[in-house]
């Protein structure tokens, strides 16, 4: 087993280099988006747009020259990326579609759909086959039915059921409104004809655990939100998987001062060796998305960066310490604070409601200038228009 001993500063540097958040930008343009998502496995999707949606903010902090149109084109024009479930709702490489065959079968087996939803499905597929991609509003099926989380329209429930089981794909979006089409018109038949590459559920779990370690950059063997979406994974099985991955030399042990043992993927040995040479790296300021891969294990972030972050969007307003939609501020290898910024689409203005610096952070002119530069970038990003299908 390969093992390295790192200071916290070295571990931070490794993790941020892995994510492309320090030094010169590693990822550039559309190909950079593909390269990053291939490394990360997926980026988590959330429709809430206060100053940019979460996947867009993830890419804005990493991709040199990132434009909103790039992600839209990769998803709905070039179809090199796809919306589906990985870590909850996510975006991943289209070529990974068959790895989530079991996820689609799981939705079939759960059978939440009621008889009226099943009856609607064949009608909807025939309608889509005739007219092309549709959204729920295009279908005259407005009666309410019980669905996963609440009552919703029959049209929406049936469309989502067909999407969950893989009969439909998201063809495109207009804002957050989803338009669905038959999967055979969105994906190559070579992918649709493939079934699961795994011989067992354990093998699938093992693949996903390793994928999540690469997603975050480093992980420890303990309960974590980073494992969300790996249905059926229990602590004893996770420990067994970690032990096997170590024996197979697929993981590297990281001994970090005053922390539990962490692990990274074996492919990152060269990056660790580079960090141990104490390279001089350009200091960058970036605003980090609430659902950023870097933050999937917030206890790990607290232990490594001494930064305590909670996404307070679901916290009652009276109980919030900071705000509704607050982004951590990364500066060099430190989380120096957090920012609450809201974009008004009608006025095309970004308003910074508050910036909170950490207690031990000095408010220097250099830091102020770096934050202001990112505020300007965030404003310009939000003013971009996307040419939707």
Image: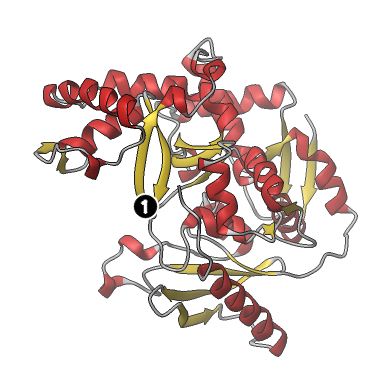
- Residue 148 in view (yes/no): no
In the displayed structure image, the side of residue 350 where residue 67 appears, left or right: right
Identify the residue at horizontal 32%, vertical 31% (top origin).
131
Q: Residue at x 46, y 30 (%)?
A: 235
Residue 158 lies, in percent from the top left, at 23, 31
Q: Indicate left or right for 271 with 374 as reference.
A: right
Q: Residue furthest front?
A: 130
Q: Nearer the viewer, residue 119 or 286?
A: 119
Q: Quadrant of residue 79?
A: top right
- Disc tally is 1
The image shows residue 321 at horizontal and vertical percentages of: 38, 74
Question: Which residue in the structure is indicated by mark 1?
Answer: 176
Look at the picture and state if 258 lies above or below 318: above
Place of residue 310 in the rendered image (x, y in percent of width and height, measured from the top left): 43, 62
* Visible residue check, residue 67: yes
User: Is the residue 82 above or below the residue 357 in the image?
Assistant: above
């Amino acid at each position: 087993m390969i093992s390295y001993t790192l200071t916290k500063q070295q571990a931070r540097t490794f993790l941020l280099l892995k994510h492309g958040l320090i030094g010169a930008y590693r990822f550039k343009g559309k190909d950079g988006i593909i390269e990053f998502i291939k490394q990360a496995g997926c980026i988590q999707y959330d429709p809430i747009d206060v100053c940019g949606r979460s996947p867009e903010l993830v890419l804005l902090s990493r991709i040199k020259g990132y434009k909103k149109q790039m992600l839209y084109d990769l998803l709905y024009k070039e179809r090199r990326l796809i919306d589906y479930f990985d870590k909850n709702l996510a975006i991943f490489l289209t070529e990974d579609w068959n790895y989530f065959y079991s996820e689609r079968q799981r939705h079939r087996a759960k059978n939440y759909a009621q008889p009226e939803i099943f009856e609607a499905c064949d009608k909807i597929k025939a309608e889509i086959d005739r007219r092309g991609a549709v959204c729920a509003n295009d279908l005259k099926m407005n009666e309410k039915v019980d669905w996963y989380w609440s009552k919703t329209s029959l049209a929406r429930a049936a469309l989502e059921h067909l999407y969950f089981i893989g009969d439909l794909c998201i063809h495109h979006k207009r804002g957050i409104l989803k338009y669905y089409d038959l999967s055979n018109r969105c994906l190559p038949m070579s992918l649709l004809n493939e079934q699961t590459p795994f011989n067992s559920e354990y093998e699938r779990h093992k693949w996903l655990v390793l994928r999540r370690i690469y997603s975050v950059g480093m992980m420890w063997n303990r309960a974590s939100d980073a494992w969300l979406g790996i249905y059926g994974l229990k602590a004893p099985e996770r420990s067994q998987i970690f032990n096997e991955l170590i024996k197979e030399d697929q993981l590297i042990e990281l001994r970090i001062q005053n922390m539990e043992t962490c692990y990274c993927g074996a492919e990152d040995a060269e990056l660790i060796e580079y960090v141990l040479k104490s390279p001089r790296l350009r200091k960058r300021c970036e605003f980090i998305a609430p659902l950023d891969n870097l933050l999937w294990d917030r206890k790990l972030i607290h232990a490594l960066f001494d930064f305590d972050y909670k996404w307070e969007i679901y916290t009652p307003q009276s109980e919030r310490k900071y705000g509704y939609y607050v982004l951590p501020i990364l500066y060099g290898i430190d989380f120096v604070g957090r920012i609450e910024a809201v974009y008004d689409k009608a006025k095309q203005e970004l308003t910074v409601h508050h910036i909170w610096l950490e207690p031990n952070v000095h408010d220097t002119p250099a830091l102020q200038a770096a934050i202001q530069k990112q505020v300007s970038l965030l404003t310009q990003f939000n003013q971009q228009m996307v040419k939707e299908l």
